[in-house]
Image (tube, rainbow, N blue to C red):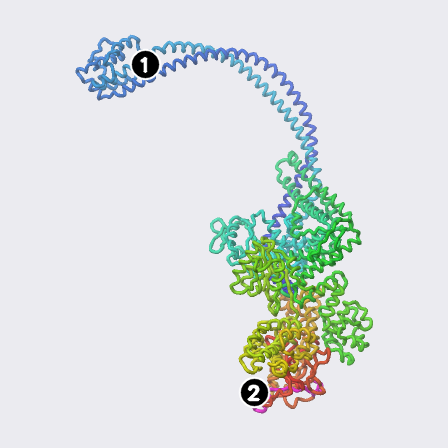
Amino acid sequence: MPFSFAAVNKTSKAFFEAERRYNYTTPKTFLELIKLYKSVLTKKRKESQEAIDRLENGLNKLHKTQGEVDVLVENARAMALEVEQKVANANIFAEQVGVEKEKVNAENESAKVEADKCAVIAKEVSEKQASCERDLAAAEPLVAQAEAALDTLNKKDLGETKSLKKPPPGVDDITAVVIILLEGNPKDKSWGAAQKLMNNVDKFLERLRGYKAVIDQGQVAKKTVEACRSYLELPHFNKEIIYNKSRAAAGLCEWAINIVKYYDVVSEVEPKRQELAAANAKLQEANTLLAAVQQKVAELNAKVEELEKQFNAAVEDKEAAIKESERCQLKLQLANRLINALASEGERWAKTVETLRANYDVLTGDMLLAAAFVSYAGPFTSKFRAGLIKEWIKFLSDKGAPMTEGIKDPLSLLVDNAIVASWVRQGLPSDPTSVQNGTILTNSERWPLMMDPQLQGIVWIKERESKNNLQVIRMGADNMTVVMERAIEAGHSVLIENMGESIDAVLNPVITRSTFKKGRNMYVKIGDKDVEYNKNFRLFLHTKLSNPHYPPEIQAETTLINFTVTEQGLEDQLLALVVNKERPDLEETKTQLIIQNTEFTIKLKQLEDELLYKLSTAEGDITEDVALIESLEESKRVATEISEKVVEARDTEVAINDSRNKYRPVAERGAMLFFLLNSLNKIHAFYQYSLNAFVTVFSRGLDLAPGGPKKKETVTLRQLQKRVSGNAEDFNEVIKKAKRQSSNTGGRMSKRTTAQSGFTAGVNPSMTGETIAEEEEETDMTPDQLEVRIGNLLDTCTFTVFNYTRRGLFDRDKLIVLTLLTFQIMLREGKIDAAEYDALCKGARSPAPPPITDDLSRWMNEGQWAAVDALAAVPGFGSLSKDLEKNSDEWYNWSNNEAPERATMPGDWGRMNDFKQLLLLRSLRPDRVTNALQRFCESIMGARYVNQDAFSPQAVVEESSSATPIFFILFPGYSPSKEIEQYARKVGKTVETGNLTLISMGQGQEGPAEAVLDKYMKEGGWVFLDNVHLMQGWIPRLERKLEYAAENAHKDFRCFFSAEPINGAPHAKIIPESILQTCIKISNEPPSDMKSNMRRAFAAFTPEAEDRLSTMTKKNAYKGILFGLCFYHSLLLGRKKFGTGIGTGSGSGLGFCRNYSFNMGDLTTCGDVLINYLEAYEHIPWDDLRYMFGEVFYGGHITDNMDRRCCTTYLQVLIRPEILPGGQLADASSWTTPQLDLAPGFKAPLPTSFDALHEYIENSLPAESPVVYGMHPNAELSLLTSLGETLFKTITLVSGGGAGSSGGGGAGEAAVRSALKDYMERLPEPFVMLEIEQRIKEKTPYVVVALQEATRMNALLDEMRRSMEELQLGLDGALNMSDKMEALAKGIATNTVPALWMTMMSTRIQEVFSLLGWYQDVLKRYEQLAAWTAGNLVTPNSVWLSGLFNPKAFLTAVMQTYARANKLPLDVMMFVTEVTTKTVEQVTEPAPLGCYVHGCVLEGARWDKEEGVLKDSLPNELHQALPVIMVKPVTTEQYSLEGYYECPVYTNMQRANVYSPIVSMFTMKTVDPSHKWTLASVAILLQDDLAS
């Protein structure tokens, strides 16, 4: 694990160097690896064990079945005999049961007769019983009334009544009836008898209540009741009447009446009761007879039942025997079927079990590799991933870790073909890198963060997670937290798309998976809210940025996955696009074959899993499970059928691929073009291109190829990918179609009859408005015709893409991109050698070339000779140096040619191919390389690649759509909005009609801009947003609106916008990447020559401006000075092309030391100042004007003193009285030609009128050359040389510079070790400062400088030795490689000075030496210091000024020494320099005054040794080595610049630098005015860049 961590750190550095992509590893990353390893190992072990158990279970059941077959055969024979015996026994029982059943049937008939009789009697009894019960039911109310009457009686009432001596009238009659009923009609019915009867009230009441029962029992005589009737008929025998006399008597009265009535009813029912009793007796007799009969029948039935049971048992036994026999036969049959069906599977399963068991033992190492891959490989491209995997596998193998033998790819450990096939069906590209990305995403425990600029990964995720209710949101959206909370609770998936380089803080707990337990559930905090965490929740992070820079904390908590399309993957996709256009039938068949194969792969896996599952989960004896065996047979049959189809489909697909691959060169060219475009962002941030935009342009190029199909179908890669997710057609039909199509070895050709002809490739007739009437018929192509067609496709698609790209490039980059394109095509076609190409790009120079001959030195400098010596190492150039010496004159003539690239090289060299001649040209005439490259590219690619058509708004608008914004890059003096407004008017879009809006963006314009965008997106219209770079805070809102417009805008909506690049900051993110990727970029850069600048400058002023002046004199003066001012403005703009120091990539400060953004605002403001000053003063204030122009307005931009001196010198030369005509300014007739030459041969014009001045600009300006700017013609050589160097540096940067290796092994490490050993052996020992200081007799300023230099040299040597020893230990494996060690190794490998060593240089400059050259320089510095600090520390006779760490200190020491000797204050000291005629070897003694210095070179002029003055440079001589210079101290009074040019001294050609803008100022004798050398940028350099 630590090794993988260190390896990733190492690869990340190489990755950054090659791709400029950031990847961080932190301790958290390492801990996540450990966690993932434990998880994936546990999971894989479980899966492997389950697979082993499942397979073994299936195998065991197969083996068991095989062992049971023989037993089943014997059992079947025995079972057959047993069945025969049981069948005979069953037949005997059947006869006995039949006899007994007949007896039972007869008895059953008798029993039935008796049962019928009983039924009749029972019916009669039932009817009589019902009648009695009805009569009795009618009497029940009477009883109830009687009892109710009794309820009215109570002891008190009865006691009171009983105590009466004489009852009330009528009461005695009632008691008489009671006595009759209770006592049976006695003689004594008197009141006394009544009192006696009621003596015991309770008993009396009880007798009354029990009287009903007596009646029911028939114990009441009829006569007793009849004796009561006379009483009952008495009028007062009534409850109501008697109640008033006695309540007790009333109750007895009511009882008596009702009880008598009850008796009457009962008396009527009694006969019926008697009849019922007789009937019941008869019924009982009949039932007794029936029971006897039934008992007999039951006995017979029991006997029969017993026989039937015995019979049924015999039958069942027989049936069971038969069934068992059949089961045994079926089991035998099924067992054989099972064995036959799964015999082959059993063999394979057995092998699989062995493999799984073997793999189980090596899971420890395999899963370590897999976990490292998932944890670390995501951010890298395929090349770096392969390097990491190879390095990890090697390490694990070397350490003896248990691993699968021969493993090369961890994917096989994590996914199978079925899973990959399902991903492809869901929309994931099928190339290896995409499959790796899918594997990382699905196996990582951290949330994935997808870098997906081509939007291919997000399409897959949306399809894959749709079943999980995927929620798509954006970072920072209003509903982000709400959606996130709901998804986390519900366990849904969330995709955060198009995020930037930061994550909203509120999501940190989710990103870091910071869950906590509360109760039984897990929660996560979002803001202030605790959200219940569902374990099914999944989060996906996505960005469209092609190269985002995520900080370590984000990369530690997420798994960064690089979904950027690979070149091979894109090639396959583009091949589908090309074939779909050329042979749609072929592509459709190919798609169907892919669908069939993926479906087959998935189905086979499902069938095998299903088969194993059924077999392993089957319970009991599987040979008896018919459904299972039939299902297994069917699964096996389908699997076999599918396997056969897979073989057939794959064979057919091979044939189809052969036909498709005929178009592969076009797809390969397309992929190369896209990756070329994709790498241009290393040049400038504006160069961003989306895959969708590229495919649109590429498709247009295919459509423009002559001879293709007429039908131009627009299909995107996404649409082609979706086809793979479609439904499968009939397999047999697909195979038939495929075989028919693959038999056609060529393609299809359109045979056309065209009314219009002659249009060339690359021109879309629809854009020219021409109508083409044609008929088309498709015919099969011959191989020759197909070859021509492929050539046409390559030609048109390449040019269309290049033209689309070129339109958005800065002028300085157009040749670079064309050169890259040309070389890439030639390299891939094998037309140029890779080693030669590498030599051309590097332009190496030998650090120690042999001495140059005198004959060659007259026309060749040391730098050229060093380049020639290095070129000799390239095969084919070994004899170059000897040939140069042998034929020096011929080579001199060729080299001295103005355009040597057009001239024939001497001897056999002229017969070399053009590319090899480029190598020679770069070595001998590097200034002509750019011109030669242009000619070379034109000859290879064609003239149209070099000559660009003028910008056409019509063509751009026709290419655009509502989804395609148009971006204009702003340049000084260029206003694209005016061009668009003019064209818009032609097509009916105007501000007046409301369908065109032009907005100059600035503070407060956000609202109006958004309102217009919203309106036009709905209704249609054009909007131009100018200067959007001023609205950095608002641009993200513009980005979102344009994204919305791409999907929903009106078809007539168009958005134009413009922005200005930042000078010196090509990688500044001014415009969001997503906008740059989709927009059409227009870089309509205005020409930078003098005439173009003058046109634009003078066009900024109108004749109306002079009306502000009061007199004709002032008006004429205004026009004359204004012309000079415009010329001054044009000079400043044009001078920039000769170099602006560090920051622009040109590497030269010949034009200016720094880059300045002079603009039209400066010019127009100066024009206003000119009018004001002329009007305010009677005489022209020349000094004031020069000051205002040079120090205030233009000078406000300037930060470097030498640049300020240059600009003010221009004004001193131009803005002076001689610029105006002689004579009276008010009287044009008195004028004479102005005496001032604005440039050599270019007089100041007569200020007659603005029109005349415009005409003068057009007709009289001299040709463009450095002379116009006051510079020597050699300045153009310097410019061209710098441009050439910049071009090749950029090409190296864009193409990766050969970097990108994932390790330091092999030949590269061997070379580093060898060079490291050499450097360490040659490194001198540090100075012993204590010993040196002990030898000091007097600490003079020179001695102090020597000590300071020695101290700094020691610091450098110590650091070099320490770092090299540390690197040696790192290479030996004794130490882990650190960042500094990696940087040093890289510097040694690439021959560049490591930054670690450069920081020890006090100059802190951008190093121009190679490492070899720099190392030699350090050794020479050491030699000078060793001589200086030896003995008594005597200052050398001549000091090598370039070899000092701090040359300023030495120059100060010169003045200090003189000041001390003459007892002068240092602040009155200065120094002058005098160039001697001596070489350093001729200096044998110290200077008489001051000190001698040497090692300087002169740029911009030459030193005439004979005359001892500055002179113009010789042709082609850019740098001249100066003789020894004497630095002579003087006082300020003695200091004079009369006859001298104050020459700046710089470290190198880059001149100005943040840390050391200038070393010093030397005085150089001159007979010419010093301003000549100022304008020519003459300077002394301590390092000769061109010789380095």
Q: Is residue 1230 above or below residue 757?
A: below
Q: Which residue is mark 2?
A: 1466
Q: The disc labelled 1 sits on which kind of residue?
A: Tyr
Q: Position of residue 1506 (x, y in %)?
A: 72, 87
The mark closer to the camera, 2 or 1, is 2
Q: Is residue 697 above or below residue 1183?
A: above
Asked whether 1337 or 1109 is in front, the reply is 1109
The single residue placed furthest to the left in the displayed view is: 165
Which circle marks residue 562 in the picture? none
Q: Is residue 1438 visible?
A: no
Element class at badge 2: helix
Q: Position of residue 69 (x, y in %)?
A: 69, 34
Asked whether 740 or 1246 is in front, the reply is 1246
Label 2 crowding class (10 Å Cα cut-off): few <14, some 14-19, many 20+? some
Q: The disc labelled 2 sits on which kind of residue?
A: Leu
The single residue placed furthest to the bottom in the displayed view is: 1462
Asked whether 719 or 255 is in front, the reply is 719
Disc on the earlier residue, 2 or 1: 1
Instruction: Give the magenta-colored segment's residue range.
Output: 1457-1483
Which circle marks residue 262 in the picture? 1
Quarter occupied by residue 705? bottom right
In the rendered view, does 1030 fall on the left or right side of 14? Answer: left
Q: Is residue 1477 covered in magenta?
A: yes
Q: Position of residue 625 (x, y in %)?
A: 64, 34
Element class at badge 1: helix
Q: Position of residue 13 (x, y in %)?
A: 63, 64
Q: Is residue 794 covered in magenta?
A: no
What count of labels does the image hold? 2
Q: Is residue 457 visible?
A: yes
* Residue at 57% across, 19% down: 306
